[in-house]
Amino acid sequence: MVMRDVQEDPQGRHTLYTTYRNKRRVRCHSEGRIRVTVWRDRKPLRREMRENTQDGTPGSWFKITIPYGINYDKMWLMNSIQNQCSVPFTPVDFHYVKNRARFFVQGASTASALKDVSYKICDEENEKVAIFVNPSTVPYSVLNKLEPKEMEQLKLTLNKRYNVSQQALDLQNLRFDPDLVGHDIDIILNRRNCMAATLQIIKKDFPELLSLNLSSNKLYHLDGLSDIIQMAPTVKILNLCKNELKSAWELSKMKGLDLEELWLQGNPLCGTFPDHSTYISSILELFPKLLRLDGQELPSPIMIDTDVPYLIKPCKESSEGSDELKSLILQFLQQYYLIHDSGDRQDLLGAYHDEACFSLTIPFNPEDPAPNSLQEYVKDSRNMKKLKDPYLRVQLLKHTKRDIVRSLCLLPKTQHDLSSFVVDMWLHTNTMLCFSVNGVFKEVEGRSQGSVRAFTRTFIAIPASPSSLCIVNDELFVRDASPSEPQSAFSIPVPTLTSSSVHTGSREQQEMVQAFSTQSGMKLEWAQKCLQDNDWNYTRAGQVFTTLKAEGKIPEEAFKQIP
């Protein structure tokens, strides 16, 4: 076997049947001999010279490492360092190594200035940010920087692939583009130098780029693409299909890009989620403005514009409109609990947003971890001080309105004492209301029938219409009532049904009238009339009562006089 440098045998180049430039081999059989031609890198001397004489000072590059840098927004991190650093600097090759952020700078004076910044920056949790500085070899993207001729050919290739009318750039399978292969140029986007060169061209030539297709490029990490936030901030559609991305963690390197459409089909990461809804929610955490994922329309995101300062200021009791908000909340609570206590909670579906969340919690006492009195609620309790299983914690957080109402239907049937309610509205904006209600209720069936419970419920709601609310978050806390609470609860005597006050109906109808009278505060005959006018549909009667009361159309004499 003979092994020779291809440059010693120019004719050997014509025997090639492949176009790869690096590590290419040709085997020819001739009279029992095998000749192996090895192609060497074409620029070893030039790169070695560049490495040692970059600015006339060998070893002038320094590696900058920020522990846990993956936890910080890249723009915030770099801006904070630039603001604190006594000299301006240009970060090179920014990327992540596990949970660390890393980049390179040139010059000992810059490195020294960056070292002085360590522990001078505090994050949102008031933790100081450490910065480590170490000597380094020439960074990969500098050592392997594309030559001017290669950059020019890449620019021509990208321009051919750009759709002006759609402001879209199709870089699918870029490595095997005939124009690049014909000029013996390897553009492998998984390499930071190639991705950096591509983004530089995009920034200069396609500043209004809306759609970028990077499918089928064998991307297994997105370090090079982390600069897209600065280089191509206008991108709204990104196609990463048929690559080798194994974890959603790679996508976090682009966090901050305001994507509206993302394609990830054909990546191993798609199979790492327990179900499709978890996949969607995990991606939405990274790109909250996303409208489509893998071609599927997503629910419209509920956005609160925190850029407008006045929107997030808590309300004041004296502010204009507080009476209207008070009326809206009280009307909502009355209608909600009329339906809740009617016996059929399915009608609560209309009170919740499609993607609402609900959780239930009961007190945690280490000496009595499962109190018998609250046994019906233990299995659904999401108290994190007791619940150690992270999977179960996720399962007990009910998502979507159907899951929430299904869970509510499984809880004991109740009768709430509306007169015990204490309501507090603690935040409101133009797009959101946050309020809580404390009170007591009685279980009306089951083994704990007659037991009085105390509860606190916190609602976060958005306007469904000018006169109605839609729940997006619901948290319920249930405990045993204190000795004094049952005494004051349900203290208003409920008149019994008599033939002189109402017409005798079935026992079920009598119970409905009595419950409706208690809930609404109306006299028995008026409660019965309301139910009769609505064909004994308890839920509809409650809705009609709430509307008429809000409009002031129910006369005073309809209500019981409270001594």
Image (cartoon, helix red, strand yellow):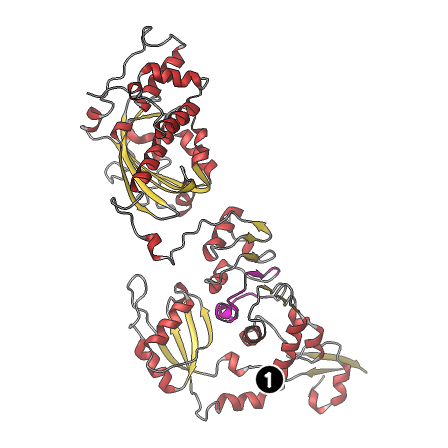
The residue nearer to you, when weighing 35 against 198, is 198
- The N terminus, quarter of image: bottom right
Residue at the far bottom in the pictured view = 56
Residue at the spot 72% in from the left edge and 79% down from the top edge: 26
Q: Give the range drawn in magenta.
A: 219-242
Q: Is residue 361 above or below residue 243?
A: above
The residue under label 1 is: 147
Q: In this view, does 97 lie above or below 437?
A: below
- The C terminus, quarter of image: top left
Residue at the far top in the pictured view = 499
Under mark 1, the amino acid is: Glu
Q: Would residue 401 be counted in the magenta stretch?
A: no
The residue nearer to you, when weighing 265 against 491, is 491
Q: In this view, does 63 lie above or below 101?
A: below
Would you say 136 lies left or right of 157 here?
left
Looking at the rendered structure, the secondary structure element under dot 1 is: loop
Residue at the spot 35% in from the left edge and 46% down from the top edge: 388
